């Protein structure tokens, strides 16, 4: 389809393992965002890309979290040494240009469970 | 600290009622405010986007208003239908961080026939 695509849709991993979550934004969207949503809460901002560069990574909780977007389209969120507290839905979104005047489109999320 | 709060947390209404969802924010230096809908196990769908220079936006049975001075936004849903049942999230972007949305926890709406 033409929407934001995220894989995997579900991931169960053991504590301490490494995880990668992938996001395919809408074609032509230069802005890409990662958010994290815990049960019963609204999404929390993690990182924003404009093109290939991370324009704002202030939401990444610690240095175990890292994200890349090497060619300005697909992005990967990487989590090292996972902890049980990392369990959440990781949402990717994209928009045409920056977010101030543009509609943001969200994917359905990657549900991460750390056991 | 910039925060967004939504009340009520949950709402159950009979079909056909007009209803209002409330959102408040702590910083009047707002860039824009958006309302989203989230169905269980799904991502978010943007409903309405209000720029800081605007006071309201309308789409079909939905109307959202923005009052920067009081730090409030409301989402009005006319003639509610069972298909409107979902969680509605309010999100704002603020000065100093226009690229990030700060979300409320949402209002879980159930419209029963």
Image: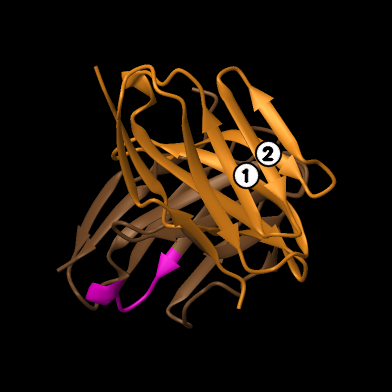
Residue in the image at 22% along x and 61% along y: A113
Give coordinates of residue B55: x percent, y percent.
Answer: 77, 41
Question: Which quadrant of the figure contains the N terminus of chain B?
Answer: bottom right
Q: Quick check: is A27 in the magenta stretch?
A: no
Reading the chain from its start, which is encountered first: label 1 or label 2? 1
Give coordinates of residue A105: x percent, y percent.
Answer: 57, 38
Residue in the image at 50% along x and 49% along y: A92
Residue projecting furthest to the right? B53
Q: Nearer the viewer, residue A75 or A37?
A: A37
Asked if the residue under mark 2 is in contact with the one under mark 1, i.e. CB atoms within 8 Å, the reply is: yes
Q: Is residue B99 visible?
A: no
| Location of residue A62 with respect to A56 vertically, above or below | below
| Location of residue A57 with respect to A7 vertically, above or below | below
**In the image, which residues are magenta?**
A78-85
Which chain does the residue under circle 2 lie in?
B
Q: Quick check: is A82 in the magenta stretch?
A: yes
Residue of label 2: B49
Asked if residue A60 lies left or right of residue A30, the reply is left
Secondary structure category for the residue under label 1: strand
Chain A hue?
A: brown
Quarter of the view holding residue B85 = top left
Asked if residue B92 lies left or right of residue B37, the reply is right
Residue projecting furthest to the left? A115
Chain B hue?
A: orange
Q: Which mark is residue B34?
A: 1
Share a chain, discs 1 and 2? yes
Q: Nearer the viewer, residue B61 or A93?
A: B61
Give coordinates of residue B97: x percent, y percent.
Answer: 72, 67
Asked if residue B105 lies left or right of residue B69, the reply is left
């Amino acid at each position: 389809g033409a929407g934001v695509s995220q894989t995997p849709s579900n991931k169960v991993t053991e504590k301490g393992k490494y995880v990668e979550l992938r996001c395919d934004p809408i074609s032509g969207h230069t802005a890409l965002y990662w958010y994290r949503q815990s049960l019963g809460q609204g999404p929390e901002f993690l990182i924003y890309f404009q093109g290939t560069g991370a324009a704002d990574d202030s939401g990444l909780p610690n240095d175990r979290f890292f994200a890349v977007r090497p060619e300005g389209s697909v992005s990967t969120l990487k989590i090292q040494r996972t902890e049980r507290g990392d369990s959440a839905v990781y949402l990717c979104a994209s928009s045409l240009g920056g977010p101030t005047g543009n509609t943001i489109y969200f994917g359905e999320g990657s549900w991460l469970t750390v056991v | 600290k910039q925060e967004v709060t939504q009340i009520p947390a949950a709402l159950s209404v009979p079909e056909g009622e007009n209803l209002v969802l409330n959102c408040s924010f702590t910083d009047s230096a707002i860039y824009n405010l958006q309302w989203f809908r989230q169905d269980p196990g799904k991502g978010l769908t943007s409903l309405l986007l209000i720029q800081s220079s605007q006071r309201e936006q309308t789409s079909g049975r939905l109307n959202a208003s923005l009052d920067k001075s009081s730090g409030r936004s409301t989402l009005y849903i006319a003639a509610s239908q069972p298909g409107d049942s979902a969680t509605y999230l309010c999100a704002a972007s603020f000065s100093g961080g226009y690229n990030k949305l700060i979300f409320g926890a949402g209002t879980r709406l159930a419209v029963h026939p």
